[in-house]
Each structure stands twice: as C-alpha cells, then as structure tokens.
Amino acid sequence: MVEIPTMSKSNTNLRQRKPIERHHDELANGDDKLRKLKFKSHAPLPASHLLSLLFFILIVFAAVIVIEKQLPVGLKIADEQKHSGRFIAERAHNYLKKITALGPRVAGSHANEVLAVNLLTKDIGDIMKGAAPNNILEFDLQTVSGEFPLEFLDGMTNVYRGLQNIIVKIGSHIKSPHSLLINCHFDSYIESPGASDDGAGCAVMLEILRVLSKSDKILRHNIIFLFNGGEENFLPASHGFITQHKWAREVRAFINLEACGAGGREVLFQAGPSHPWLLETYSEEVPYPFASSMAQEIFQSGIVPGDTDFRIFRDFGNVSGLDFAWSANGYVYHTKFDSIENIPLGSLQRTGDNILALARGMAQGHKLADVDSHRLGHLVFFDFLGAFVVRWPMAVSDLVNITTVILSFYTIYVNAKDAAKIVPPQKYVLKLTQCVAGVWITWLATAITVFAIAMLVTALGRTMSWYARPLWAFFLYVIPTVLVSMAITLVHAKYYHKDIDVWPWQIFQLYYDAYQLIWTIVLMIGIVMRIRSSFIAMMWSVFPLIGSLLRAKIFSSWKDGRWLLLHIGTMGLPFVQSFYLIVAALYLFIPIMGRSGAGNNSELLIALMVGFEFVLLFSFAIPIILLVKETYRILNLLLGLFLLSIAVLIFTPLGFPYSGDPNSLAPQRFMLAHTRRTFHDYSTSTPNETTGYWVIDFDINSPHTVDKYVPDMRKAMPVDQDCVDHLYCGMPYIVPVMNLIWKTHWLPGPMPQIQYPQVKIQPQVETKSTRGWNITIDGPAHMAILFSPVQGVDLLRWSLSSPPLETTYLWNGRKTYFIYFGRGDKFETFDVNLEFMVPKDHEGHIIDLAVTSHYLFGNSKSSVSFKNFVKQFPPWTAVCYWSSTYESWLL
C-alpha cells in the first residue's frame, strides 16, 4: 500500500520531497483508488479560496465597467465665468439641438444643402463677430465635383457633383503657412437625425472654434475647421476639399471626428500613417485618453463594416492624422434613434476638452512646421483605464518584447532547475510539452463547447439574446468557458501527471509555465510580424515571469492564502487591462451584429469571440483548480448557473433580443426599398418587370420576427436565383456590399409612385475588336451604374478621370464594376462612355449593364401605401426606407 503523505509544513517544501524514482515504484504497486485519494489529499487550498477569487473577479468586472462609463461633468453656460477658456458642453449641446432639429440631412436634400448650410454659416458668422482682435478668421463656402476610386467594402468608383463644404480658418498675424485640419460632416444617414453621426462632431468643432477665437493666446499655426457636406455619400466632400481647395496644400496634419455609436467616450482608433509625434502630442495633452493600437489594427483589418474621411486625407492628401469616434451605444447608429436625447452633456464635455487640448497642443507646437523630419516611426500605444497613455516607438517595443522573451525562457529554465529533485530536467521538458498540448486541448474544447451552445440556441430560436442584454453572453459563453477549461485541465493533469510526487504545487507550476510559454511564442510571432497589439502578449508574458521569480526566490514558503494573494497581485494588472480592452471590443461588436447581415451567424460569431477572449483572460486562474479541494463544488456551481440560464432563456421573455425602451434601446434594423425592377432581354424588346419591397436582412433573425405585426412579411421570399440570373441579384444596392449583405428577401407589392429616371444608351463607333456605349441618366440625386463584361471581354477605357476599379465581388466568375453617382441640390445628369475589348470570334451579348436610382428624401421617398406598410413595424424596430429602381440590359 502506498503511504499517503499528510499536508504538513514539513512536506510542503518541494526540496524536501522524496525522489521521483521511489514514488514511481510505489505508484506501480498501487491502484487507481489510491491515486485518486492521493490526488484529493494533496490539494492545499479549500474550495472557498477559488470561489472567493471568482467572486472577486466579478467585482473587478463591475468596477472596470463602471470606470469605463465615467464621464466628466458637462459645463453649463452659467459656469463660463468660473471656467474662462474652457469648452462649454451646454453651448455645444445648443448647437447640436439646432442641427438635429432639421431632421435627416441626406446629401442632395434641401435640409442638407440649404438649411444646414445656412444654419452653420450663421453660427460661424456669429463666432467670427465675437473673435478677439489677435485672431484672424477666414470663411469659405466651397462647391466641389470630382471622382475617385474607393476600396471600401466591395470597392467602387465614386462620382460626385455639386456637394458643399463650409470651411473656416483661424490664424494670427504670424501668417503661418502650416495648418492643422479638424473635420466633421454635417450630412446624415437616411432617416437619421444624425445627432452622433456627425452632428455632435460639428457642434464640438463650433464650440472649439468659439473658444479659440476668443482666446488672447496667439496661435503659432493655423487651424482649419472643415464642415463637410457629404460623408455619408461615401466620403466625396472631404475628397473635394483635400484635392481642390486653396487651403488644402497647407494642411500638415488632421483630426477627424466621427461616430459609430452615441455618447460614451471617443476612442482614438486610427493614427498615422507614421508620424509618431501625433500620438506623443495626444498622450501629453488630452485629459481623458482612450486609445489603443489594437483598435487601429482591428479597424484597418476590415472587420468593422465602415470607413471615415481619415482614408481620404491619408490616401488622396498624403496627410497623417488622428481618427476619433464614439463607439458606445452603437444600437442607434444610422437609425431614427440617433437623436440628441442619446447624447449626454458629459460626452460632449469629454470630447470637447480632449480635442480642444489636442488642437492647441498641435497648433502651438513646433513639429507642425516640420512634419517631414518627424515622419518616420510607429508607436505602440494603449491607455490604462483611461488614466494615462502608455506609448513607445517600435524600436523600444522590440527591445521590451525581445527582453521579455529572453527572461520568460530563463524563468521557465529556473523553474525546471528548481523542480529537478522531483522531475528531472529532461522529463520536465516532456511534462511542459504535455501541458502546452493540454492548454491547446482546453482551447479546442472551449471552442467546440461554445460552438455547440450557439447551435443549440439557434435551434431553439433564441438567437442574439445578448443583443439587448449583453449579460447573456456571460451566462451563455463565459461560464461554460471557465467550466470546460477547469474540467479539461483537471482531467488532463490526473491522466498525464499522476506520477509526480507532491504534485499539486509542481503540476500547477507546469501548467503556469505552459501558459507563459504559449504567450511567449505568441509574442515572438508578433515581433516577427510587426503586430503593434503584441503588447497584450507582452503583458501576459512579463507578469507571469515576475510571479515565478517572486515565488521561487522570495516567497517559496507561501503555500496558503498568502500564495493566492501573491498570485492575484502579480497577475492582476494584465487581467484588468485585458478585460478593459475586452469590454471596449464587446461594446463595439455586439451592436455591429445587428447590422452585419443575415448571411453571418452572429450567434456563432459572438460565441467564438467571447469564448476566445475569456479563455485567454482566465488563463491565470484556470490552473488554480489543481490546488483546490472538493473541485466538484466549483464545477457543479458553474454547471448549475449555466443550466439555470438556459432554462430562463427558453421559458421566459428575457431572452428577446431587441428593445424599444428609450432608456435601453436595441432595435432590430430593417432596410426596405420600394422598387420597380425592369429586365431587358437580349433577344426580345419586351422587358420583364416586377414591383415590390426589397427587404435587406441586417441580422440572422430577419425578416420574420415581425410577421405578427406585419402580416405581409410572411410572403417575403429569399432572393436566391436572381443572384445567379442578374447582376447584383437584380436588386438596387445603394453601395456594393455583396460580400457582406448577400442574404435578402423580396416581397411583391404595388408600383412605386415616383418620377422614373430616363436612361439613354447610345452605341459608339465599333471596330473589329472594340465595342462602346455612351450612357446618360437623368434621375434623382443618388444613382449607380453597374456592369459586368462576359468572359473574354475586358474594359478598355471609360470617360471618367478616375481609373477603373474592379469590385472584389465576382458574379458568376465575372468581373464587376460599380460606379456610384451623388450630387447636391443642383440638377445634373450622369454621363459616362464605356469601351470594351472584344475577341474577334465573340458571339452574343458583351456586357450585363444595370442602372439603379434611389429616392432618399422628398415626396418621391415613399408613397402613402409604403408609409402605411412601414407604420406596421413594432416600436422595437428601426426601419430605414426609400424608393428605388433597378433596370438592366444585355448589350
């Protein structure tokens, strides 16, 4: 019989343990029951310790969320005497109230091109009248036309005519030839009052302009305020400014104000390219930082379905800058709920204080006058709980990361050396390898588990419960992640490491080293691939190595609750910082799931995202299960919580994914286009025509969630065969997003009551190898030409000044082109010549051509019957609707 050692002070020290060889022989003569008994008896910590840790983690979660939501007190106009030279949130709020009172301001509409322009011009005029004499203010109203390729979503060519920009420059008698540009856009999305996107940005700029104009401090360099009138038209107005305006040549850097949410904190999510001085100035000047190079890498990866004027200034102006956006409460973004009621004074105050301080710092600094000498370099940057920004150049980052890798491997070597009396070095390497494999198995098991739960939830018809109540993601995916990780670790340790004496402490160290080794390898990959968000892997490598050294060299005798406190102390900072980043990511991505398209299983995406993030976040806590007695108490508690949550999800209405409550809005999005579709066949003169409602499905539950309220929706048919037969599914896509929004429905309906566009297609002079057409369209302010040459035919040239840009969407294996046309309130036709290279032996048609038109405002936007149809939708929905046409030809 194997003697079971007791847990006394005399046998807790690893160096006093009997040799592994003797223990191995004893185990060979024992049985499984004794091994299990040995496993339990060696656990040094009571289950209450781990329960206390898990409860403490919940407290940390709550504290980080509270900190993340903190906003400064918004200053009132009555407080202005006490706060001279400060940004006054109430005044910005008043500007915003006037802008949003105009309603939706779609580019080309009277509200945008006349009312908004007049309003902003008047407010700017009032500010200029009250300016201090040492400040020189200049005003310009620019009308712009142009065209450019835009590699956004599927890719498109943007043609614009007659859009407007309002521009103010503030400088001094110094007459500096260098300027800082600050940009917002005053147009809004269809149906949206545009309070956050981007009325608030313009209101903030107006108040900053007022504060600077009244200041007695002389500006070293100029600041140009660009209020652009066409961002939602896919960035044309900013292109018109940076490529055509007389002041564009003096812009040395820019600040762009945007939104993909409402209120909350503005995040610096893009910086550069290069020019690390921009981030240095930001970190030194702003009072409330919120920035991360990880956010920049995520946005520029294309995961977030959006873009900003940052791209235009960078790509067409060759200027570097900083891109800011509100990201909280993304539920109201581009909906009728984006109103002033969802913009707290604290958000305006925070953004105003930050941008004012940043603008002053950049305009008063010497680097703006010599940006070329500060061009080179990239910064790794992130803020810690909004208190301060950590930043260092890539060279310093490389030095820190490489040093961390070396020290990490050294501490693993030290741990192996210290354990030599129990596990020989060669065997330690084998055991460590097994533990690394065990961690990978844990991650795989977690992925399988959350995948299975997502499929179960989908089968039960309870998808997206976390959309309106993000806490559901915790119960559905975080708890199972922790449960499975601990259970797999426990089983893996019992099976692979039952031959190690005094095993709880030593096995814990093996799994601890395994996690550290994995993070170190990830860090090495980040160094090689120049990934700036590798600072996360660096934190999860450097703090574990510090913990290992402390335990091995200073606190080796701590094997009780003090050990747990030491472990929490060393791992607390990367845990808190990582959770802070996870919260920001979830605030961004959960609302995005409501507009990511029905073709994407948002339940599965969130399940995998949450599982991945939290299995990494809990990597410091998972191995503690090896040190705990009565592990079944922990596992049973987690399992019980999960099963209870599933029961509540199934049998109560708490799992309903949407909310129309003004205090917690989470509406389901619907986009409807009342459409006439006309298809001209190649062989006959009689076109095929259908009319009805095109339903763009924005999430996995669309469109039948509203069948009870909108009975006609039961007749909606999936658009499948049309996607094979017709270019862009024979539907009036307003922007090329087939790679994202490809799952839609068609509902037969009455004829739209609109003045239909006039399309003229005139053949050009033909040769043996070329064919060409001139296409002229008289129609609304928003139109598009889509075409796809047949196999073997290539676009030779077109009349646009912008070079042809193929979309990334292949239709039946064929190239496609998307030309978007938008104009101001002045009527202009859309005219383009297309010429193609055709093989000599070609027979049949040469291209599929389609023309779409979109009536986004005015009387043609919707008929009485269409409005009545929209009114049937329940209050927990946000419906964006307009009338449109799609007409195609085989040429």
Image (cartoon, grey):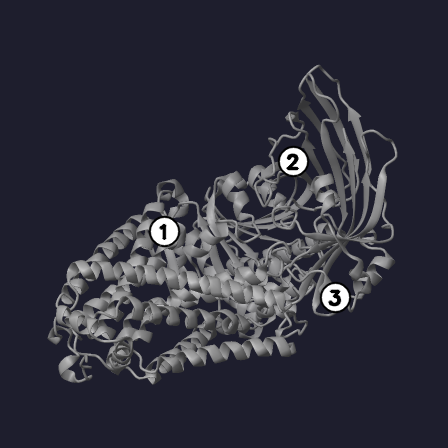
Residue drawn where x is 41% and y is 46% of the image: 368
Which x, y percent locates residue 131?
A: 55, 57
Q: Nearer the viewer, mark 1 or mark 2?
A: 2
Is residue 196 visible in the rendered structure shown here? yes
Which x, y percent locates residue 160?
A: 67, 40
Residues at marks 1 and 2, CA–CA distance in whole angstroms: 38 Å
Quarter placement of the N terminus: bottom left
Is tag 1's residue or tag 2's residue first in the polypeptide sequence? 1
Q: From what the image shows, is residue 59 above or below residue 439?
A: below
What residue did someone put label 3 on? 706
Based on the displayed image, in which of its 4 quarters is residue 511 positioned? bottom left
Q: Which mark is residue 379?
A: 1
Left of 556 or right of it: where is 651? right
Q: Residue furthest top?
A: 768
Residues at marks 2 and 3, CA–CA distance in whole angstroms: 35 Å
Is tag 3's residue or tag 1's residue first in the polypeptide sequence? 1
Left of 432 or right of it: where is 287? right
The kind of residue tagged 3 is Val
Q: Nearer the viewer, mark 2 or mark 3?
A: 3
Based on the displayed image, in which of its 4 quarters is residue 58 positioned? bottom left
Residue drawn where x is 53% and y is 74% of the image: 79
Q: Of 426 and 774, which appears nearest the observer?
A: 426
Left of 436 or right of it: where is 461? right
Q: Label 2: state its secondary structure.
A: strand
Q: Label 3: state its secondary structure.
A: helix
Quarter placement of the C terminus: top right
Q: Which mark is residue 817?
A: 2
